[in-house]
Image (spheres, rainbow, N blue to C red):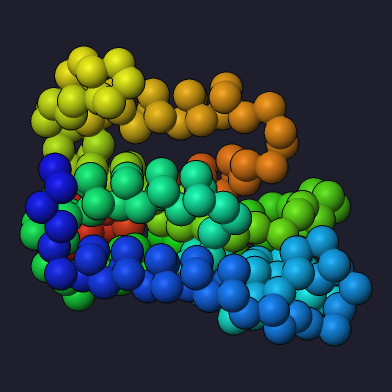
């Protein structure tokens, strides 16, 4: 599970480099809302539509920035665990398209739903949208592959793992800071992409 493929390795390196840059680079925007997320993190985060801090490029940049060590650690752990199999299965170009599409799609869904509901939502950052897209793809393509969980160390089929991780993440969050809508959005985009590829005779 930890035989990291070239593209996945590069994605991990990019995320780690940006994470350290977030800690070291103190430049910030002029918008008052940057006081809530200062420095480079505030510029890379995806802000609600209507916010003076919002910029279209954030649909791309937010998925490479993280809010803390635990945040990036668990996202990169999931990426290194499941993504190499998908890269080997699809090839690097198709996997890269999938990764970016699910990550950006998750951000678009998060922002639009919050905008349409009038809640605005908070600023968001992290690769979780793309990670949940990877988990959905893994469950759809390799449903009966058994995965050994870390805690507890028991095997579980991939098709059940996707729902288990989603439910556990939701139940363990008591802070209200986890963008569950983005998680759902990444999984939803992944579902439709894979279904479309199947109708085209691809995999």
Quadrant of res 84: bottom left
Indicate the quadrant containing the C terminus: top left, top right, bottom left or bottom right. bottom left
Q: In percent of the image, x 78 and y 82: which residue is there?
A: 29
Which of the 4 image quadrants contains residue 120?
Answer: bottom right
Residue 173 drawn above or below residue 118:
above
Q: Is residue 21 above or below residue 98?
A: below
Does 190 appear above or below 139?
Answer: below
Q: Is residue 79 left or right of residue 129?
A: left
Q: How far across and how far down the image is residue 143, in percent?
A: 18, 32
Q: Quadrant of residue 78?
A: top left
Query: In the image, what residue occupies the spot 50% across and 45% down?
Result: 70
Lateral position of residue 64 relative to residue 170, left or right: left
Residue at 28% across / 57% down in the picture? 196
| Residue 26 appears in the picture as rendered | yes
- Expressed as whole percent of the image width and height from the top left, the position of residue 181 reads 60, 44
Residue 17 in percent (x, y) is at: 42, 73
Residue at x 21% of width, y 15% of height: 154
Image quarter (top left, top right, bottom left or bottom right) of the N terminus = top left
* Residue 48 screen position, x and y as percent: 75, 64
Question: Going by the picture, which residue comes out furthest to the right?
Answer: 32
Tally of marks = 0
- Of 66 and 200, nearer the camera is 66
Query: On the rendered structure, is 7 left or right of 122?
Result: left
């Amino acid at each position: 599970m930890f035989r990291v493929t070239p593209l996945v390795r590069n994605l991990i390196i990019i995320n780690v480099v940006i994470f350290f840059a977030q800690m070291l680079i103190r430049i910030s925007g002029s918008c008052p809302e940057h006081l809530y997320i200062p420095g480079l993190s505030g510029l890379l985060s995806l802000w609600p539509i209507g916010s003076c801090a919002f910029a279209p490029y954030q649909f791309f940049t937010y998925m490479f920035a993280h809010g803390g060590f635990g945040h990036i650690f668990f996202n990169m752990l999931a990426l290194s665990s499941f993504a190499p199999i998908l890269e080997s299965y699809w090839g690097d170009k198709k996997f890269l398209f999938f990764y970016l599409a699910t990550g950006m799609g998750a951000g678009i869904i998060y922002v639009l739903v919050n905008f349409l509901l009038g809640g605005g939502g908070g600023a968001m950052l992290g690769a979780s949208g793309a990670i949940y897209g990877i988990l959905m793809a893994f469950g759809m393509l390799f449903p009966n592959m058994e995965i050994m969980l870390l805690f507890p160390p028991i095997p579980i089929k991939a098709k059940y793992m996707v729902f288990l991780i989603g439910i556990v993440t939701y139940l363990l969050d008591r802070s209200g800071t986890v963008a569950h809508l983005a998680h759902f959005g990444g999984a939803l985009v992944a579902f439709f992409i894979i279904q479309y590829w199947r109708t085209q005779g691809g995999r």
